[in-house]
Image: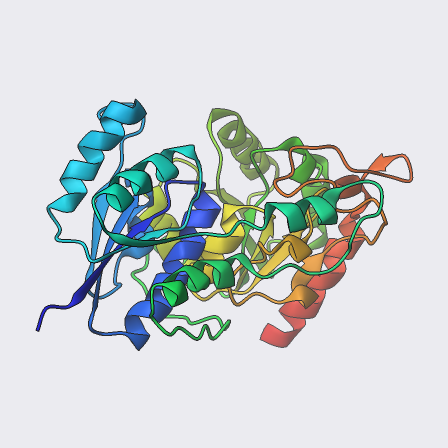
Amino acid sequence: MKKARVLVIRFSAMGDVAMVASVLRELSAQHKQIELVMVSRPQFAAFFDGIPNLTFHPIFPDEQHKGPKGLWRLFNELKKYDIDYVADLHNNIRSRILTLFFKTAGYRLAILDKARHRKKELTRKRHKIFKPLRPTVERYADVFRTLGFSLKLKHQLQKEERPIPDAYRAILSSKTIKIGIAPFAQHPYKVWKLSHWDTIFKMFPASRYTFFVFGGGKQELEQAITWNKQHPHVHNTIGQLGVKGELDLINRLDFMISMDSSGMHMASLVGIRCLSIWGATHPYAGFLGYGQSMEDCIQIEHPNRPSSIYGNKSCICNGIEAIDLVTPEMVGEKIDEVSSALI
């Protein structure tokens, strides 16, 4: 009997793709008869390692899959998998063009409901409706439910032992509490003051703590190297491991601290608890990491929050940017709380 084969589409962004991986793990476990074909950017392939019956197909949106002609080429590549269903978990212009090709060819498909109207109600300045929206992972799951697959998400962290990255084996062997930090984000209104991290590193000394810095490009790498020079118990990982290696390393940590960014979702993917710092955005928008807790969200409450879903708009609270109202003392208190439970 032929297994049902489902094409899954989510091209970006990094955190969103990681959330898809969490959902597909659950789907694959509950429906062993399903075969999955995941279409995303090649750098995200490692998120899907270990998911049974999953084939990863890369999209190159700036090269051979650019524009309508490129998407038609991608469509013809994907047809060769003998697809039964199409799950569009992106619902952007590029994915809608691709799904239109499949719809015209008679394929059964379902498309993500992004709840744009509800998100506008949550982020508007006047008459804000401050209520939690449906979690994004449940919206992803709804797409498969629409296609006829029952799916019950556990919303629990599931840790599986991964390989120890050789470059960090000696550091990981120390008898310290090991904390990963993902202090950077695409938008400035989601980034906690970098100077605050110096305070944190001093509050939690090398005798008991080891920090690992994740994420970013050249500028962020320079910052991580500077921290290492000033605080020897702070170690850089940027540009050292690749996505798979970063997941392996995060899996070996005691916990993570992240902005509302992909670092949180990568921690979820390997079953690691993550403290998250929120400013212009809010976990009510549905992007809290899979299996993470609202109690681990560090934020200030203010009627102006949130101002945006993605953190690309300023959020002024009492004359100060919302993220800047989160103090090192607030973060330090939470680190103390979590660390105490580990001892």
Q: Residue at x 53, y 53 (%)?
A: 264
Q: Residue at x 50, y 64 (%)?
A: 138
Of 81 and 167, the residue lying toward us: 81
Q: Residue at x 12, y 53 (%)?
A: 82
> How is the structure coloured here?
rainbow
In this picture, residue 324 sits left or right of residue 44: right
- Residue 48 picture location, percent across and down: 30, 55
Of 160 and 306, the residue lying toward us: 306
Q: Quadrant of residue 145?
A: bottom left
Location of the N terminus by quadrant is: bottom left
Residue 335, can we see it? no
In this picture, residue 317 sits left or right of residue 292: right
Relative to 123, is 329 above or below? Answer: below
Of 10 and 273, the residue lying toward us: 10
Q: Residue furthest right?
A: 318
Q: Residue at x 20, y 73 (%)?
A: 33
- Residue 266 picture location, percent across and down: 45, 54
Location of the C terminus by quadrant is: bottom right
Residue 186, can we see it? yes
